[in-house]
Image: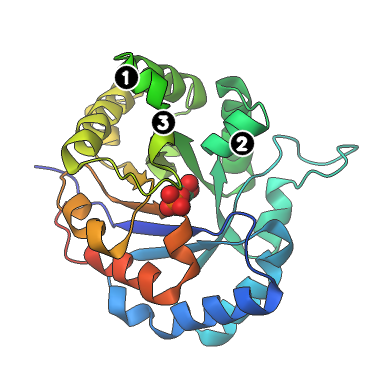
Amino acid sequence: MAAPRTPIVAGNWKMNLDRSRGVALATAVAGRRGEAAGVELVLCPPAVYVLPVAEALAKAGGDVAVGGQNASDKESGAFTGEVAPAMLLDLGCRYVILGHSERRTLYGETDAVVNSKTKAALAAGLVPIVCVGETLAEREAGRTTAVVTEQINGSLAGLDAASLEKTVVAYEPVWAIGTGKVATPEQAQEVHATIRGLLAGLSSAATAARVRIQYGGSVKPDNAAELAACPDIDGALVGGASLKADDFLAIAKAFAGRKA
Ligand code: 13P
């Protein structure tokens, strides 16, 4: 029997919105949080808006969490422009997205860097949302499993069972991000099952059964239900559609009835 996993839907706002629109969106989501009862909700604004968003969520009451979109692997010191995991925690973050494909491709983050950041985030008390996923060329070359295997084994190397259980994995095929081209439920489920097998290899089947694996890449209200129906898809990491309360909540609601 599968271990129960609380679905988790996170909004990756990327470099969008301004302070007042971010606060308004967070307030709207918190106010309608009941529409997705039983689903953990996380909003990930740009780092400079983490504090006002966290304050707005606290004011609204409830349990919508805040996350960062990136963090340093260093604790403190002379690292101009960087944000330490403890700083995000200090502002009220519970989560941090790490190794997003945009950071991997545009900012040169390797699996070793993501691994170092993951360990630093866990040490600071944050829950990392570690992203993996293949490009279109890699999929077409039949390399999806090989790429994801390397990313999972590299990014999560050396984590003990307790750390792995806490960690959230996001499978985001690069070709589906911001393109409107969502993976089919069969394509997504296949990779999610592969990832769970890899997690079992890193620890045990029991630990792997407790790890939440989100799907990301053009998740919209009209395709969320079929993704949520897949046994190994435990939530979504939502980009564009997370910028509208209606869409974000509709996606989250699709995961509310999900049976793990
Ligand atoms: P879109 O939902 O806009 O495709 O973005 C997905 C993503 O990158 C979330 O991290």
Q: Dot 3: what SS?
A: loop
Q: Is mark 2 within 8 Å of ligand 1?
A: no
Q: Quadrant of residue 251?
A: bottom left
Q: Quadrant of residue 70?
A: top right
Marks 1 and 3 in Cβ contact (< 8 Å): no
Marks 2 and 3 in Cβ contact (< 8 Å): no
**Relative to residue 126, is residue 101 depicted above or below?**
above
Q: Is residue 205 visible to us here?
A: yes
249 left or right of 68 in image: left
Residue 181 x, y percent position in the rendering? 33, 44
- Compare marks 2 and 3 and give the one earlier in the sequence: 2
Q: Dot 2: what SS?
A: helix
For the residues labelled 2 and 3, the Cα–Cα distance comes to 12 Å
Question: Mark 2 belongs to which amino acid?
Answer: Arg
Marks 1 and 2 in Cβ contact (< 8 Å): no
Q: Which residue is mark 3?
A: 133
> How many callouts does the rendering have?
3
